[in-house]
Image (cartoon, rainbow, N blue to C red):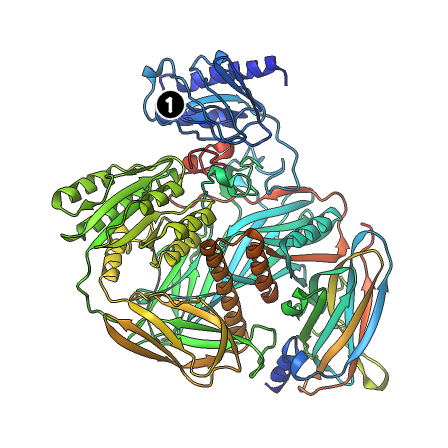
Amino acid sequence: MTKWMRVMNVVLAVVVAGLALWGCSANQVTAERDHQLSNQYSPVGAKVNGSFAPVPSDISPVAGDGAISFDPAPAGWWDPTTGRIRHALDSNAYIDADDMTLGSVRGVVGGRREFADTIGTIRGSSTWRASDEIWVISKKPAVAAASDDVPGSGAMLCVMPDKPEHVPVPLKHTSVRASVVGPAAKVDVTQTFENPFSEKIEAVYVFPLPENGAVTEFVMTIGERRIRAVVRERGEAERVYAAARAQGYTAALLTQERANIFTQRVANIEPGKSIDVAITYYHAITEMDGSYQWVFPMVVAPRFNPPSMYGSGVGAVARGDRGGSGQKAELQYLAPGERSGADIDVRVDIEAGVPMESVRCGSHSARVQHVSGSRAVVELSRGDRLPNKDMVVEWKTAGTYAKGGLVWGSGRPGGDDAGAAEESFVLMLVPPENRERLQRAPLEMVFVVDRSGSMDGSPIAQARAAVKRGLERLRPGDSFQIIDFAESATALGSRPLEATPENIRRGKEFAAGMDAKGGTMMMTGLRASLAFPHDAERLRFVTFLTDGLIGNETEILSAEAQNLGESRVFSFGVGSAPNRFLMDRMAKLGRGVAAYVPINDPESNGAAVMDEFFDRIERPVLTDVTIDWNGARVNDVTPGRVPDLFTGRSVVVAGKVSGGFPRPVKVTGRVGGKSVIMEVQPTRAAGDGGRAVAAICARQKLSELEERALIEGWDAERYSGSVRRVALENGLVSAFTALVAVDSSVRTAGTSGVSVAVPVPVADGVRYDTTVGGTGGGDKGRGRRSGD
Amino acid sequence: MMVGALAAALTVGAGLRVMRGPVAETKLSSAGSGERFEWVDVYVSGERAVGAWQVELKGDGVKFVGVEGADGAEPPVYDAVALSGGERLVVGGMCVASSSKAPSSAAVEPAAPSPPERGEGGRVRIRVARVHVMVRGSVEYAGVLAALGDVDGKRIGGTVELVRGEAGQP
């Protein structure tokens, strides 16, 4: 592209921007932006009052006199009052301050991905409102040809001009069949992929599974033929899949992007043909405050990827903006008003083992059928099959229920091999019920609130309500601090405030003023919350209220592990599809517990969950927990040290045993200064039960490795080697292993076809325009902002 | 019930250790160049109708990339521990001879399952699995029948046979 053309682009951009903005309200701006986008214009932009987003190494910034230009240019729009960049890169545009009549851009550009620059003022800024966004728009370049490397869409996707509300997708249906027996669940997820197009395709679907799920089985069904996938090292599986795809064989590949995000690829689906992919996973069902929950996540909510995650995050782009995030994995999101043809049906069969008091599904409309006193079947209603939020089924057991249990068995197929060399076990520890309240020590409460764009609406309202209630529960002698974060962190004060009526009033005012906007620089909030000096006279509790929709979970957890000190971290996952992996891990690392604040459950809200938190910390904790295995030969026990047990929260201990358990196991601990001994009767599991035990045990081992790596600072090689060994031996999908299946029987004709992504709706309650990147705007795609 | 118990014991892992039954070995060559995909059909022959089986398959230059049941039957299971130690696929399953899903010698596409073949002396030969493989260059497969049981849950003698195939050009 010549410089002249670039200048013309900018002129066009500026004119369009001017048309879009002058005299407009924020809503009008947004509408105009969407209109322009729909007319094949894409945003190109800059940012003021801050630094440019980090730009990948293939961008060559050129500094001139009073101007900065990029070739290709960073795309986006800026907010003149906050200086927040809201979009990322476009390769077909050019910015030159001399041509920008709306403002000037000048400063010094340097570094490879870090830009230190100062930006001039916007001329004519008096006409701008604080909430306005300045857009510079240029003509969108032609859609790039489908690449083999990045999940996304080919040109065939999303071109439905006559029916914009309906989007053809290769994922036709998802069927979920869960069987819960006591403390373990087996879940079969069958995804039906169908090619609605006239040529061969590869379907790519990024989807969530529970963070503690152990994915062990994967069967591809073509017609009546069923092919079981084989576990491989991830790189090897990807190579096998790529070769099969290139040679025309039907193949399927399941990889893990995060502990709770997976990518499913199915290659060489011929026109009109359908292929089923069935995934089986197991997970433990833990007790939460006297009730049990089965959660099935239906959608990956858009996540913010800070600069450090460039290229390795999970990007969020608008449907059709293939590769727009620059991330390793990418989700395409349906715009508001769009509906994919895919739907979902869910059936959960619960055998509690003891009489059930109640069964409910607060997240969705569902039919509950009581089969017997201890068994119920829950089915998702036909009218509520839009997969845009976590499905949560909750049940309570009546009267005295099992307080923990120990099961062991073999995970090897056909493994009813009593007396075998080594089997797996899972011990569920439930603290004894104790309603006694202790004279609690003075608290130092740190409320940390995420006010990034994805929290806009109900989530931030719930977070505000939770903080307000938390402040009301403080007592004289306590102290508190409130920290909120988005792009940066702000605090109510420079040090913890005494819980006086005046300070509590200030705190409530501060909380009431928290608005959700911008990216999720959680690291900033985390550091701010753990960094300031600890008052040794008080117990410090750090409560994180966030949806956790970020891509740098490992960085966050690592920082938490390194900076935890005397703090205990309690995480509160807010929203319809929070990042439960992050919430659970933060709490576990922080010696606390996680809780969830749904936005669409009338029986639960931020204030109620905060009340439960205070109730919990005011009750005795089972400490100094030790286990007497009573003659059983156990090894590889995780966690290595049993954590304190809070009332109402169970803990899973897993490991290997040789020769089974000859006698009951004794668990001892201290509650409120008194010694407690619990005796747990072991039970041998057979068949599927044994496989469930082995899978849950192996998954727990992977979690333990992850935590040790974070705390002890393992290098990547040691960590990946350890995970790889455990995952391969147990047939598990992990960050370093994958499941691949190839049908070598039939070779399809023609090239491997374009890659078609399965676009998904944004999570319920999450705004599309503030979270989805690519041509749709938003900050969750690349989020290449500096300042972490 | 008895069939189930023995069948379970015969299958992967447990069977290999607990009751190492009839051992029969076979070899199969595949000539070619470059990286390509092919399949190996696994047949077992028993003195009587087969209820459960376990076969070990290995070969230099091969990568196992899928395990398929015969005629739409449940895909056999494999032992991840064995595979993690090298390219050794220990695979096994159960058969219910009277079922319409009984393994047969049927090839890829036919929908109707074929009955087990009855050979000399009343021996029964059935296809129990198709193993999908990625290979490079010329390779030689080695198959070992590690365990075989009849539908009554009794150990029986038998042999294993491997038959190679590949998809033609589309």
Q: Quadrant of the N terminus of chain A?
A: top right
Residue beneath label 1, please?
A80
Left or right relative to A554: residue A205: right
Among the 4 quarters of the image, the one containing residue A721: bottom right
Q: Please report the residue visible at 65 percent of the width from the left and 75 percent of the height from the top.
A: B12
Q: Please report the residue visible at 81 percent of the width from the left and 66 percent of the height from the top.
A: B141
Left or right relative to A297: residue B96: right
Q: Quadrant of the C terminus of chain A?
A: top left
Q: Please report the residue visible at 72 percent of the width from the left and 57 percent of the height from the top.
A: A743
Among the 4 quarters of the image, the one containing residue A455: top left
Q: Nearer the viewer, residue A312 or A385?
A: A312
Can residue A597 be seen in the rendering of this structure?
A: no
Left or right relative to A779: residue A674: left
Q: Nearer the viewer, residue A307 or B30?
A: A307
Can residue A295 be seen in the rendering of this structure?
A: yes
Q: Nearer the viewer, residue A147 or A395?
A: A147
x and y percent of residue B105 in the render?
A: 78, 71
- Above or below — where is A277 with respect to A493? below
Q: Please report the residue visible at 47 percent of the width from the left and 26 percent of the height from the top.
A: A35
Q: Nearer the viewer, residue A786 or A385?
A: A786
x and y percent of residue A41 in the render?
A: 53, 24
Q: Secondary structure at mark 1?
A: loop
x and y percent of residue B33 in the render?
A: 85, 53
Query: Local crowd at mark 1 within 10 Å, few (<14), some, or many (≥20)?
Result: many
Q: Chain of mark 1?
A: A
Identify which amino acid the numbered label 1 is placed on: Pro
x and y percent of residue B82 in the render?
A: 67, 69
**Number of dots carrying numbers:** 1
